[in-house]
Image (tube, rainbow, N blue to C red):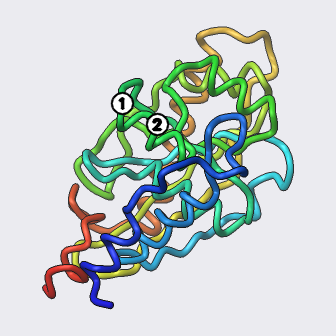
């Protein structure tokens, strides 16, 4: 089976939901289809998985580039590495893309939905604002960290690293940042957001490469380049 036929098989949507869809609409069988799809382009390794809790919730913040779908691919890679569901923030509230993204673990960019997942012990990936390459992270939206502050779960910086001419990609998870111990407030969230961004930048400086916004597209496998 050639790569184009394999791609068509992977993205063919089932006609009905399976019996294993969870409370947030994630379908493990459909997730595996997307893992197979990402395997057409990437051979992704995950470092620092030991920093994630085994059973409790955690918020992982990754750098992102426009069109790169970094939170989704990071969630797929990390979930496979730690053998547990990993969700990501960025589900549009419109059909057909909203329901499709929900089935691979996407949550709405709403603090209440993120907080509910964290309280239920889920690992959630959220992306920083888009940056042009792998050198620096964009700013981290402090409002999305409010759910982690409220639930007192770990907030972990993570770097997503890719190269336009290689199949290898990496998700490197750093140690959890230390949250303020005082009363929750906007300054707590701003402080954590700034700290997370600096930690992501440090990871990118250690592991980063050049990268382009379209690295995730399977040009080399599909079109023979």
Residue 101 point in image, percent of width and height = 45, 42
Q: Measured along the vertical axis of the image, is residue 42 above or below residue 55?
A: below
What residue would you read off at disc 2? 99
Instruction: Verify CB contact (< 8 Å) between mark 1 and mark 2.
Output: yes
Left or right: residue 41 compared with residue 115: left
Q: Quadrant of residue 182?
A: top right
Q: Residue at x 28, y 80 (%)?
A: 5
Question: Residue 163 bears which disc, if any?
Answer: none
- From the viewer's side, name the closer residue of 102 and 51: 102
Q: Measured along the vertical axis of the image, is residue 216 above or below residue 113?
A: below
Q: Quadrant of the N terminus?
A: bottom left
Q: Residue at x 34, y 49 (%)?
A: 136
Which element is circle 1 on? Answer: loop
Residue 51 point in image, percent of width and height = 74, 57
Left or right: residue 196 compared with residue 72: right
Which element is circle 2 on? Answer: helix
Q: Measured along the vertical axis of the image, is residue 64 above or below residue 164?
A: above
- From the viewer's side, name the closer residue of 199 and 105: 105
What residue would you read off at disc 1? 95
Disc 2: CA contacts within 10 A as few (<14), some (14-19) or many (>=20): some
Q: CA distance from mark 1 to mark 2?
A: 6 Å
Check the image and name the residue furthest to the front.
Answer: 15
Residue 114 point in image, percent of width and height = 63, 27
Check the image and name the residue furthest to the right.
Answer: 55
- From the viewer's side, name the closer residue of 10 and 169: 10
Q: Residue at x 37, y 62 (%)?
A: 11
Q: Residue at x 28, y 44 (%)?
A: 131
Q: Quadrant of residue 113?
A: top right
Left or right: residue 216 compared with residue 53: left
Disc 1: CA contacts within 10 A as few (<14), some (14-19) or many (>=20): few
């Amino acid at each position: 089976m050639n790569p184009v036929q394999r791609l068509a098989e992977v993205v063919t949507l089932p006609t009905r939901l399976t019996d294993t869809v969870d409370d947030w609409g994630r379908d493990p069988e459909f997730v595996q289809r997307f893992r197979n799809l990402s395997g057409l382009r990437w051979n992704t390794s995950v470092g620092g998985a030991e920093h994630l809790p085994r059973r409790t919730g955690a918020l992982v913040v990754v750098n992102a580039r426009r069109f790169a779908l970094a939170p989704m691919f990071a969630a797929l890679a990390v979930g496979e590495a730690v053998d547990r569901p990993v969700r990501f923030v960025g589900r549009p509230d419109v059909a057909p893309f909203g329901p499709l993204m929900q089935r691979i673990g996407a949550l709405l960019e709403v603090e209440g939905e993120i907080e509910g997942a964290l309280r239920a012990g889920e690992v959630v990936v959220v992306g920083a604002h888009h940056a042009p390459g792998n050198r620096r992270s964009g700013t981290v939206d402090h409002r999305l960290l409010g759910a982690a502050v409220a639930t007192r779960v770990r907030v972990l910086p993570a770097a997503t690293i890719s190269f336009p001419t290689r199949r290898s990609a990496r998700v490197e998870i750093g140690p959890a940042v230390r949250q303020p111990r005082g009363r929750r407030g906007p300054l707590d969230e701003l402080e954590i957001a700034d700290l997370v961004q600096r930690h992501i930048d440090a990871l990118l400086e250690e592991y980063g490469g050049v990268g382009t916004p379209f690295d995730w597209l399977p040009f080399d496998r599909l079109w023979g380049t």
